[in-house]
Amino acid sequence: MADRVHPRDSPPVSPESQSASPQDSSVVPQALRPPPSEKPVPPPGTYVIKIPKDQVYRVPPAENARRYDQYTHRKHRRSRCCCCCCWLIGILSILIVLLAIAAGIFYLVFRPKAPKYTIEDIAVRGINVTSPSSDVAISPEFNVTVKADNPNDKIGIYYLKDSSAEVFYNDARFCNGALPAFHQPSNNVTVFGMVLKGNGIELRSEDRKSLVESQTKRKIPLTVSIRAPVKIKVGSVKTWKITVKLDCDVTVNELTAQAKIVSKRCDYKVDLW
């Protein structure tokens, strides 16, 4: 604890000194003079606080110095992280703006339009389901004709290998196959055929019964699903491989080679990656 020192008391004044004249105040006997002090005496009315030397820190102790270093380093790390985040956000913003400008220029120059796909014809062989109680496996074969319309003036489409095409009735897959690989130039309509085959297809009893009823009504709903990897050619530049997904709902009057399409509707989307 620090020692508290009270104001220094003045020495008692004798009656002789009080009666002395101002002219004699300078003459003070040697015995009455206070002994000389080695330390400076504070003026009256002040306080002196004494603190032990072991509590006076010119250098912070080890634990405080460690805390100080941790705090300063943490502050520097935060500032560096904030700077990095600001730079990253700025770069991303610039890239987004540049991409938007490039997309706008591309649209204004090339005016891209979505291609159109339709099912033109379906011929069926190998399906002879006349009784719902029959459990004989079928091996159908579908000849599907597709029309692809590319209405773009400066954009061509390359249809690549590894495509797939399937025909479904409800959830039962009848057959599968692939598209031919070809190049479709700009402003072009291409009609191509696919031969899709199935082998040993066993229908569930409910699917077989539903199929017999549909044939009786002469309205058999089918789904043609096509997945085609393509590359788009813009001018002299080809894009990366993207996937065209085409799903067509087609209703035919019978499952024979002379089948006629009663109704059809196709939807497609594109996977860019």
Image: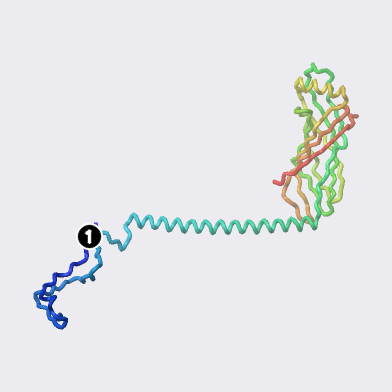
Q: Quadrant of residue 31?
A: bottom left
Q: Which residue bears the numbered disc 1? A: 3
Q: Is residue 196 above or below residue 84?
A: above
Figure quadrant of the N terminus? bottom left
- Compare residues 27 and 31 and report the one nearer the observer: 27
Q: Quadrant of residue 149?
A: top right
- Compare residues 12 and 243 and report the one nearer the observer: 12
* Circle count: 1
Residue 120 x, y percent position in the rendering = 87, 37
Look at 78% across and 30% down and name the residue there.
168
Residue occupying the far top of the picture: 133
Q: Secondary structure at mark 1?
A: strand
Q: Is residue 111 above or below residue 42?
A: above
Residue 270 x, y percent position in the rendering = 75, 44
Q: How is the image coloured?
A: rainbow
Badge 1 crowding class, 10 Å Cα cut-off, few under 14, some 14 to 19, many 20 or more, is: few
Left or right, 213 with reference to 58: right
Left or right, 38 with reference to 254: left
Residue 82 x, y percent position in the rendering = 53, 57
- Compare residues 37 and 44 and report the one nearer the observer: 44
Look at 24% across and 62% down and name the residue there.
50
Q: Is residue 83 above or below residue 43?
A: above
Residue occupying the far front of the picture: 19
User: At label 1, which amino acid type do we have?
Assistant: Asp
Residue occupying the far bottom of the picture: 23
Q: Is residue 261 above or below residue 22?
A: above
Residue 130 x, y percent position in the rendering = 84, 19
- Compare residues 36 and 217 and report the one nearer the observer: 36
